[in-house]
Amino acid sequence: MDYDGAHFAGMHIDADIHGLTYADCHFENCQFGNMALKDVVFTNCVFSDCVFKNVDVSLLRMQNTVFHTVACIGIDWSEIGRSGKLFPLFKEIRGCTLKFNSFYKNKLPKMPIVDSALLDCAFIECDLSGSVFRNSDFLNTTFQDCDLSKADFRQAKHYRINTASNRLQKARFSLPEVLGLLDNLDILIE
């Protein structure tokens, strides 16, 4: 079944969704919890004030998706953005909270995450080159073996990025948070 230009509001979904395609749809104040999105496609869709909690997205395909004030809790995005998936996955992520999310080997260049909180998340071996993380909070979030070249971390806070294991060429940072890049050097600053 296909939905084109539909508006969904106030839905609480806790059963798996199979084989649906959503194009140019708007989801507002919807909750997706403890369920799976299997062979589901979201193209040019907008999610506003929604919650995704413990949702299996391993068989989900997305393109140009917008998240505004969305909470994503316990999501493993590792299968999203691999070969055969649609690109770009996200057009914008703004004012969102991602907690206990994991990204592994995702290709997410130029991903815009602005005014958001990424708490206790993990980015491992991801391509985040040219991504914009302005004014976002990365408390307890790790970046390991990622390409962060040309990424914009200005006004971002609490990021801890190991400079030896991540590519940071021409990435942009602001004071005082940029001093966190020195943490892995085991040096004293007076």
Image: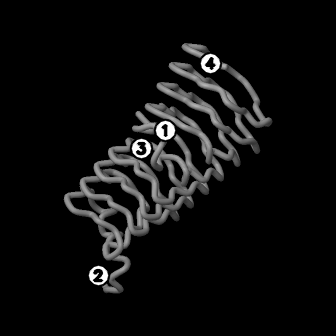
Q: Circle 4 is placed at which residue position?
A: 2
Give the alpha-carbon distance from disc 3 to disc 1, as whole Å: 8 Å
Q: Circle 1 is placed at which residue position?
A: 95
Which numbered disc flags the more N-terminal residue, 4 or 2?
4
Asked where in the image residue 14 lies, by quadrant, the reply is top right
Q: Secondary structure at mark 1?
A: loop
Instruction: Work out which quarter of the rendered image holds the C terminus and state it.
Output: bottom left
Categorize mark 2 by other alpha carbons within 10 Å: few (<14), some (14-19), many (20+): few
Tell me: 47 left or right of 84: right
Q: Secondary structure at mark 4?
A: strand
User: Disc 2 vs disc 3: Cβ atoms closer than 8 Å?
Assistant: no
Give the alpha-carbon distance from disc 4 to disc 1, as whole Å: 29 Å
Which numbered disc flags the more N-terminal residue, 3 or 4?
4
Categorize mark 4 by other alpha carbons within 10 Å: few (<14), some (14-19), many (20+): few
Q: Circle 3 is placed at which residue position?
A: 113
Which numbered disc flags the more N-terminal residue, 3 or 1?
1
Name the front one of labels 4 and 2: 4
